[in-house]
Image (spheres, grey):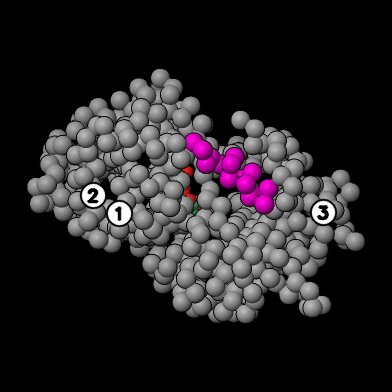
Amino acid sequence: EPPDLYPDAAYDMVVVSNRLPVDYDEGPAGETRWKSSPGGLVTALEPVMRQADGAWVGWAGVADREFDPFEHDGISIVPVPLSAEELEDYYEGFSNDTLWPLYHDVIAPPSFHREWWDAYVRVNRRFAEAAARAAAEGAVVWVQDYQLQLVPRMLRESRPDLVIGFFNHIPFPAYGIYSQLPWRRQVVDGLLGADVIGFQRATDASNFARAVRRLYGYTTRGTTIEVPTGDGESRRVVARHFPISIDSAGFEELARRPEIQARAREIRESLGNPKTVMLGVDRLDYTKGIRHRMKAFGELLRDGRLKVEDAILVQVASPSRERVETYRQLRDEIELTVGRLNGDQATLGHQAIAYLHHGYPREEMVALYLAADVMLVTALRDGMNLVAKEYVACRFDNDGVLVLSEFTGASDELRQAVLVNPHDIEGLKDAIVEAIEMPHRERARRMRALRRRVRTNDVANWSASFLETLTGTGKIAAGISEP
Ligand code: GDG
């Protein structure tokens, strides 16, 4: 008997994520306005949500404010409030300074603080309660990402009637690293409340299964985990990979627009029409290997293998997590590197790196992708990396070379990229030169193969495949898998 259902808010499909698909915005007279934030997840889930009478539960992006549920662009929005202190402890603290570095192979040292954990539990409970109130009897609830790993268990306890899915957008680390987490048992138990736990890579799923065996001794067979229910019976939980993707057709459509192609030419012109434009696009994050990329590029210039008249690196580093100390330090280090590199290598007419610490509209990103001869994705660890897929989706001209780190989830699928180990600076330098010098036929052959992959596995495919596994019927996904 599900307790306390909102009589008029009983949704058959509920998505739960830290951030809502809309951002709070204050109008000139102090009134509340809502702006869509068109991320990949929104594009992926919008059709499903519209069809299934869905609600989206999440935080509105502003602390210490409460909002009533409302409707936006045909989707029901259920805001969950966070205080400024919770934002610091649950979000900036436990999510972004404990889990994020731990799950990315401790590239930066994770901080463990008991008060952060307490806030994480408290906030996860609030999200679980909001989802439980919004969900109809037997509804599908799909929980997103590492900020909300305890929600599946909490939901199962209050609402055993629900079908519960969880998707982890970031890696799940090897047990030797995961086991550092003081709350490692609680987090695994939280996730095991779900019916299906999705990961980006097969390795992530097997790392998780291993953690389950080590911490609980449960039996795992392939992608199935037997979770005892206490009455001598057990539930079957599926833990497997569902590699996320992008709205490939949407990106290609933008790339084909004449005004965006004109903008791409204008970008190249404003850079002095060099032979080679190289591009990096990342949130300013220590997982993205931005410094490794700059080191390799700087050495190629220093050693005379590249000339500053011929090659430029455009680096878009969009502002991210600026209140977390590690991110402030990283920004200082990167900006010092850019300053030094340009100081040493630039001439009056040619800069070596064009560094842009801004976010841009999607149209401008697509123009940059079209303007770039070589795309550099050198992450040290990355769940998937959508930038790599976006670059490929935009290159309907079958040109351009993708240099891709093997530590990204994307490298499991994009085998025709020039694959690199970004820690190996000599190897990275050789790969950059190989990409710049690659003959046209070879570029086209590789890009065609990459494009086939990104077109076949697009984001609609990703959500359909997850939801089909979750419901076991294909009923919910049927409407969106049609071309
Ligand atoms: C996490 C995981 C996983 C970036 N700057 C601008 C901008 N972006 C867009 C990109 C891309 C997205 O942000 C970044 O996605 P990534 O996948 O590259 O990386 P994370 O942000 O770390 O995402 C990752 C992903 O979740 C999905 O599961 O792939 O591994 O870490 O779409 O284009 N977009 C615009 N302006 C910018 O300045 N418009």
To which quarter of the image does residue 239 belong?
bottom right
Dominant secondary structure, magenta: helix
What amino acid type should be assigned to the residue bearing mark 3?
A: Gly
Q: Are marks 3 and 1 in contact (CB under 8 Å)?
A: no
Image side of residue 317 versus residue 101, left or right: left
Q: Residue at the spot x=51%, y=68% of the render?
A: 207
x, y (%) of residue 383?
47, 56
In the rendered view, tell whether residue 364 sits above or below residue 49. Answer: above
Residue under pointer 2: 431
483 and 125: which one is in front?
Answer: 483
The answer for how far apart the CA atoms under marks 2 and 3 are is: 52 Å
- Res 24 seen here: no
Count of numbered labels shown in the rendering:
3
Q: Which residues are magenta?
A: 455-469
In the rendered view, tell whether residue 432 sits above or below residue 238. Answer: above
Residue under pointer 1: 420
What amino acid type should be assigned to the residue bearing mark 2?
A: Ala
Q: Residue at the spot x=21%, y=35% of the render?
A: 439
How crowded pointer 2 is (Cα within 10 Å; few <14, some 14-19, many 20+) is rated as: some
In reply to whether residue 210 is colored magenta, the answer given is no
**Furthest-top residue in view?**
258
Residue under pointer 3: 138
The answer for how far apart the CA atoms under marks 2 and 1 are is: 7 Å
x, y (%) of residue 255?
42, 28
